[in-house]
Image: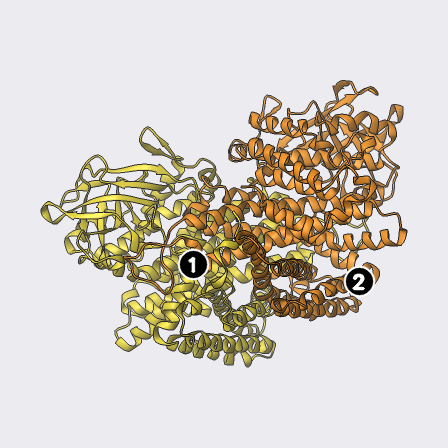
Chain colours: A yellow, B orange
């Protein structure tokens, strides 16, 4: 099971009302039917080609043999099916050879593949990310040469940012790009953690590489972006000689094992030639322009790992008999399915709350990308851009913490079976654990949220967003069943604003940011609480209809129950965390280094 | 790194004052010097034989080849060194051939091996657990035959409780024991999740098996305990024919991979003969008599997995340069070690709080086992037994949740390196994940705490324990630096008692127990908060001394800082959870089964 299509329909059409977006000229080719058809096709391929080999590509991870990477044939087969269906081209404009689909559709479609097999999907979505960057900032000549084979899935792409000595701190990268003949640059240096950095599936690999042109400014201001192919390419797209990118090692990870993760040496054994993208020294700026999309992608992948665990453990809980209810201890009575135990339902509600709450947020953010791409009004663009910027650290981080927690509960529901590799839930946990770190760690996202997104405009974007959340509170309060939920969220919004104001008033940046991660976590809870209140409000409206089929009634009821679960079990934890932040606690900041053993 | 010996000394001698226990005749052979020497020997063997192969036994897990289990030779070598040092015999009375050490020493010594290599240690500690059961309830004849080879580490032991259809619900086991010749029983049935159930290291395996004698009462009241050897044994201890216990399969787990985990079929291919231990139908009672010790053991193993991660990540954080402080962004300045970042210190404090708080509790509970074993006064025995019973679900469960969380943070501190298998922190997480489930899941422990231990005597034991905690509050309040911590704990104790009273007053057992797991979690936080306040109080006293060396000052300061971290960052979460429990929330209990997808 890789998707709850009823829930996906609910989020897209009932909660987010995406049909409004589809009226815009850019998305003229898409209507509700086209979207469902696209999701059908994706689900079919994901279930046929991605899901069945998920355990295999985990167990039989890529190996470095005779200078090449060997991996199960299933990986290439799955990606060829993905390419044949045109999914590499999905979000790109028609003039670039794309299908010009909205970003929310790319995200939703991607979710099906990621849930089925995140390790294989990575190759595809890194290619889309690299092509996206190329399309946005590359010259016409570069785009003409490199985009078509990437959008056809013949060449794959990668993102080469980190180095062994510089992971989170890009200012300290050492890879250099020295001007060479024909406007090209000689790239020299090592890049670490490169997902898909080497493989034998695609005919070529297009690396997007951050490097410094000697003589430029220090730090991130001196970083430029280069397109560096594994094999050199003629203007007409023909493949030339190898470009001297040596695979120095494969990292062996705890999860997402089927994705190669490489240490690459650029320029080892000869010249490695790269094409400058855009202007010199603007590499970080370009990269961050695409960061919202990339981080929504990682957040969505994290949600999908948890969705896989939730769907599997819910099915297990319905069919596995064990024990009796608290009020029925007679051992001669039959055992009940474990879903009858309150604590098992707690573990399922915790998963449902995290997965469906975060998915609603992630797809909401994806629609903001589409709004932004189709909006001409400058002021509205600024507003959308600020809102998306504010929510991006949340959509990346909240799932990486709380959907990971959901994976933990999925294992727990299965008991001992949960920790054996015969069941998928432990693998989904391992896969998801990486999302907490790559594409900006939890701590980095906290600094981004509080230091840049909230403090950057003196809290203005945050206050505007709070006003938006309060509209949802007002709408919910009109439904008697949601009164408690509405007031609990209202209180949390108040606490959030008050806490943020207190933090902004703190003159010492170190102290202001000392608990930025805790603030991010709590802010995320408020945002997810808002998403739940909105879902519950839609559900309460739908439940007012007469003669709803039982399954529909249960579906909507589930939204209201889970909203209540979130309001009562989760929001109070956010309140406690906000109180800590509001106190400007400096326990961690001031802890002497010497107190730690080890 | 497998131990912080300074901290272990602190807990044993300064916090718990174990020398008081050593004055009792039973432990006459032990003084502070003997204990340190024993720990030295254990550390030496653990570092030389257990730690170096930890990654190997994880990667090269036991395989079923030609009807036998094949595993790395290092496993057997490590266990032989453990046996030669006499550690199998450590906690057993001298008259049984043991070293008559206190249980706290067995626990502390065991911790060193578990931290170094939990997968190998499991074989040893299961043997001790089985021998402990045999020694307590077996006949003289059985003890004379089976104890010596187990205490010498020539024969290993296992515990066979679960079956494929009955994990947590022992009432539903189906294995039968039918009377046969010579007072023996024919054992027939399948046992699942048997750690160490098969191996080729020891000369024989002594299985402690729960089974039902036909015609007995239904449910747990009809369960008896049997000693069932892999190979039959003559009265003089000579090994006889195989006893028809077939290895039906090995489970492949996410962690603790070096420990075989077996599905065993008893009586497949011929008679499997077992010896009744004690009286018929009292198997569960016997098993639960040893449960406190067993559960302290699992809790301690969980703490040790987190200790390994904490020590490793703290060392890494001190030596890994990355980024700059929040108030110093000039990229031309050198990078700082990541321990300089407040958020990294938060992750280290979270680990230290969980590990050292839980270790103090676990060793405290172990001293209660020793108190109980050396106490003649019946009333005092009842008091100690009730207190230990109350704390056992906490000492088993709290680490399995919060020290697992600590392992998560250890991975996070290492960034991308943390999720590669070249570093130990991801393995330690995987190892620890099992402890949340085996020996009674989190949910089961919650029912045990609230349903049996708190409700069983109308809250009397809880109230007496709260009075003990309040003594610590009063003692701490005398130190000005601990005033805030003391009052925060006092408030949490009040909330705990109020919540418990409200739950006890609820007439509906299903509703009373609906949030038992949440109650356990919150109760655990209060107990760990108490342990931290006690540690901080001892530290505050020690800091009053003049001319303390810098390292000592930093050590004690660490206790005070971590107590403050726990009071401010963690206790408020417990308050939020207690408030939920006090509200008798029925969201999970009443959630309709139909609302869950999957």
Where B560 falls versus B582 (above or below)?
A: above
Between A490 and B155, the one nearer to me in the picture: B155
Residue B464: image tag: 2
In the picture, measured across the screen, residue B103 lies left or right of residue B82, that is right
Residue B341: image tag: 1
Callout 2: chain: B
The residues tagged by marks 1 and 2 sit, at their Cα atoms, a distance apart of 43 Å
Is label 1 in a helix, a strand or a loop?
loop
Q: In terms of image quadrants, where is residue B137?
A: top right
CB atoms of marks 1 and 2 within 8 Å = no
Where B345 falls versus A80 (above or below)?
A: below
In the picture, measured across the screen, residue A243 lies left or right of residue A190, that is left
Between B306 and B335, the one nearer to me in the picture: B335
Counting from the top left corner in percent of width and height, residue B559 is at: 59, 57
Counting from the top left corner in percent of width and height, residue A416 is at: 63, 44
Where B231 falls versus A241 (above or below)?
A: above
Counting from the top left corner in percent of width and height, residue A236 is at: 14, 45
Disc 2 residue crowd, few under 14, some 14–19, many 20+, Cα 10 Å: some
* Residue that sits furthest to the left in the current view: A182
Instruction: Say which residue appears at 87% left-offset and 40% top-offset.
Output: B216
Disc 1 residue crowd, few under 14, some 14–19, many 20+, Cα 10 Å: many
Counting from the top left corner in percent of width and height, residue B535 is at: 65, 57
Is label 2 in a helix, a strand or a loop?
helix
Q: Is residue A199 visible?
A: yes
In the picture, measured across the screen, residue B317 lies left or right of residue A146, that is right
Q: Is residue A200 visible?
A: no
Q: In terms of image quadrants, where is residue A192?
A: top left
Between B90 and A439, the one nearer to me in the picture: B90
Instruction: Say which residue appears at 81% left-offset and 32% top-offset.
Output: B94
Among numbered discs 1 and 2, the one appearing first in the sequence: 1
């Amino acid at each position: 099971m890789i998707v709850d299509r009823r829930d996906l329909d609910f989020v897209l059409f009932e909660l987010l009302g995406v049909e409004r977006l589809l009226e815009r000229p850019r998305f003229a080719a898409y209507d509700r039917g086209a979207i469902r058809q696209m999701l059908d096709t994706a689900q079919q391929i994901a279930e046929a080609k991605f899901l069945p080999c998920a355990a295999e590509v985990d167990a039989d991870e890529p190996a470095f043999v005779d200078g090449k990477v060997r991996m199960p044939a299933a990986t290439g087969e799955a990606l060829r099916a993905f390419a044949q269906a045109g999914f590499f081209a999905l979000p790109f404009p028609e003039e670039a050879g794309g299908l010009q689909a909205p970003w929310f559709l790319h995200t939703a479609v991607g979710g099906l593949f990621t849930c089925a097999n995140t390790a294989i999907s990575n190759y595809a979505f890194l290619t889309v990310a690299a092509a996206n960057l190329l399309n946005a900032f590359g010259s016409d000549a570069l785009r003409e040469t490199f985009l078509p084979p990437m959008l056809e899935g013949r060449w794959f792409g990668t993102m080469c940012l980190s180095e062994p000595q510089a992971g989170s701190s890009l200012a300290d990268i050492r890879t250099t790009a020295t001007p060479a003949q024909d406007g090209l640059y000689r790239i020299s240096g090592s890049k670490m953690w490169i997902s898909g950095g080497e493989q034998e599936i695609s005919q070529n690999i297009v690396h997007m590489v951050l490097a410094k042109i000697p003589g430029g400014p220090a730090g991130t201001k001196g970083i430029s972006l280069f397109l560096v192919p594994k094999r050199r390419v003629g203007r007409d797209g023909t493949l030339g000689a190898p470009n001297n990118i040596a695979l120095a090692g494969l990292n062996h990870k705890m999860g997402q094992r089927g994705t190669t993760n490489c240490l690459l040496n650029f320029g080892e054994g000869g010249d490695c030639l790269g094409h400058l993208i855009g202007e010199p020294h603007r590499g970080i700026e370009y990269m961050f322009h695409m960061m919202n999309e990339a981080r929504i992608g990682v957040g969505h992948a994290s949600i999908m790992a948890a969705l896989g665990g939730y769907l599997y453990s819910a099915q297990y809980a319905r069919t596995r008999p064990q024990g009796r209810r608290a009020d029925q201890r007679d051992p001669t009575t039959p055992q009940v399915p474990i879903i009858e135990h309150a604590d098992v339902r707690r573990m399922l509600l915790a998963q449902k709350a995290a997965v469906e709450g975060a998915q609603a947020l992630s797809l909401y953010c994806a629609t903001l990308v589409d709004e932004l791409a189709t909006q001409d009004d400058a002021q509205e663009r600024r507003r959308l851009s600020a809102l998306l910027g504010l929510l991006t650290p949340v959509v990346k981080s909240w799932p990486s913490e709380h959907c990971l927690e959901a994976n933990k509960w999925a294992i727990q529901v299965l008991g001992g079976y949960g920790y054996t590799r015969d069941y998928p839930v432990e693998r989904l946990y391992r896969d998801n654990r990486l999302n907490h770190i790559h594409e900006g760690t939890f701590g980095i996202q906290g600094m981004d949220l509080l230091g840049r997104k909230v403090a950057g405009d003196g809290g203005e974007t945050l206050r505007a967003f709070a006003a938006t959340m309060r509209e949802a509170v007002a709408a919910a309060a009109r439904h008697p069943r949601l009164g408690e939920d509405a007031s609990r969220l209202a209180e949390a919004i108040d606490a959030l604003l008050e806490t943020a104001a207190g933090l902004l008033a703190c003159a010492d940046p170190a102290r202001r940011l000392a608990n930025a991660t805790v603030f991010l976590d709590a802010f995320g809870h408020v945002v997810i609480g808002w998403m739940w209140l909105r879902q519950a409000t839609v559900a309460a409206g739908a439940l007012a209809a007469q003669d709803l089929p039982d399954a529909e009634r249960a579906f909507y009821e589930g939204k209201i129950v889970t909203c209540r679960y979130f309001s009562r079990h989760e929001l109070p934890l956010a309140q406690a965390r906000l109180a800590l932040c509001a106190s400007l606690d400096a326990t961690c900041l001031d802890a002497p280094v010497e107190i730690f053993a080890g």
